[in-house]
Image: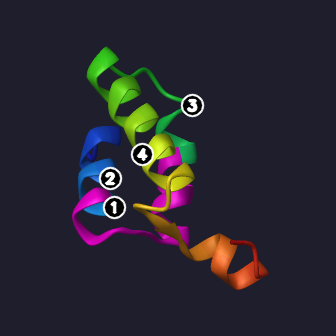
Amino acid sequence: MTRIRDVVERALATGYLTVEAENQLRQLLTTHYELEDLNAFMTLQEAAMTGKVKQESRERCGIK
């Protein structure tokens, strides 16, 4: 089973968060997860806010 931190790792490594990965994160966040997963998710949020990770969904909508 994929963990939140696995999805985050991929996004941080590539600098890109796909729509598929975003949907996967939404699903994973509705289940029981560990503190490490929550910390990884917060790291991803920070990376997205600072521009280190781009979001496919925002590019599709024209949001920067």
In front of the other: label 4 or label 3?
A: 4
Crowd class of label 1 (few under 14; some 14 to 19; many from 20; radius 10 Å): many
To which residue does mark 2 refer? 7
* Residue 59 badge: none
Q: Are marks 1 and 2 in contact (CB under 8 Å)?
A: yes
Relative to residue 10, is residue 4 depicted above or below? Answer: above
Crowd class of label 4 (few under 14; some 14 to 19; many from 20; radius 10 Å): many
In front of the other: label 1 or label 2?
A: 1
Crowd class of label 3 (few under 14; some 14 to 19; many from 20; radius 10 Å): few
Three-letter code, disc 4:
Leu
Q: Which is nearer the N-term, disc 2 or disc 3?
A: 2
Q: Are marks 4 and 1 in contact (CB under 8 Å)?
A: yes
Residue 50 location in percent, x, y?
50, 53
To which residue does mark 1 refer? 11
Asked whether, in this view, residue 13 is left or right of residue 16, the answer is: left
To which residue does mark 4 refer? 44
The residues tagged by marks 2 and 4 sit, at their Cα atoms, a distance apart of 10 Å
Q: Quadrant of residue 3?
A: top left
The residues tagged by marks 1 and 2 sit, at their Cα atoms, a distance apart of 6 Å
Residue 51 location in percent, x, y?
49, 62
Q: Residue at x 65, y 80 (%)?
A: 59
Three-letter code, disc 3:
Thr
Q: Main secondary structure of the magenta part?
A: helix
To which residue does mark 3 refer? 30
Magenta part of the chain: 12-25
- The kind of secondary structure element at disc 2 is helix
